[in-house]
Amino acid sequence: MSARLRKALGAIALLIYLCAYIAAAAWAFEALVAPAPLWAQMLYFAAAGLVWVAPLRPLFRWMNNSE
């Protein structure tokens, strides 16, 4: 598979993942964290803002693989 095709497919997968992650994070906030105190909400936003990157490492490696 060419690098150009890998990057195009990876970009599509990234957009799909981000849309799903944003929807899940928003639902989790509304269902679980919204009634919590402000400090808990801030912790949630900090965690949610960092956690999304970890599952994407394999995708980024695959996209930049130069077989």
Image (tube, grey):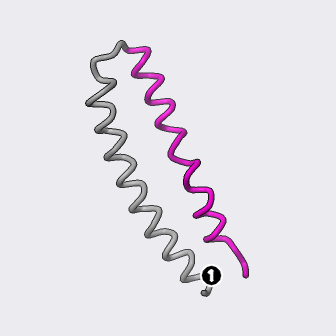
Residue found 49% across the figure and 75% down from its top: 9
Residue found 32% across the figure and 31% down from its top: 29
Residue 41 left/right relative to 23? right
Q: Is residue 44 above or below residue 14?
A: above
Residue interval drawn in magenta: 38-67
Foreground pick, 57 / 49: 57
Q: Position of residue 17 (x, y in %)?
A: 42, 58
Q: Position of residue 58 (x, y in %)?
A: 62, 61
**Residue under label 1:** 3
Specify the farthest residue to the bottom. Answer: 1
Specify few, some or many for label 1: CA neighbours under 10 Å numbering under 14, 14-19, or 20 or more. some
Residue found 33% across the figure and 35% down from its top: 28
Disc 1 residue type (three-letter): Ala
Foreground pick, 4 / 62: 62
Decide whether residue 54 is among the magenta residues: yes
SS of the residue at dot 1?
helix
Residue found 31% across the figure and 46% down from its top: 23
Q: Is residue 33 above or below residue 21?
A: above
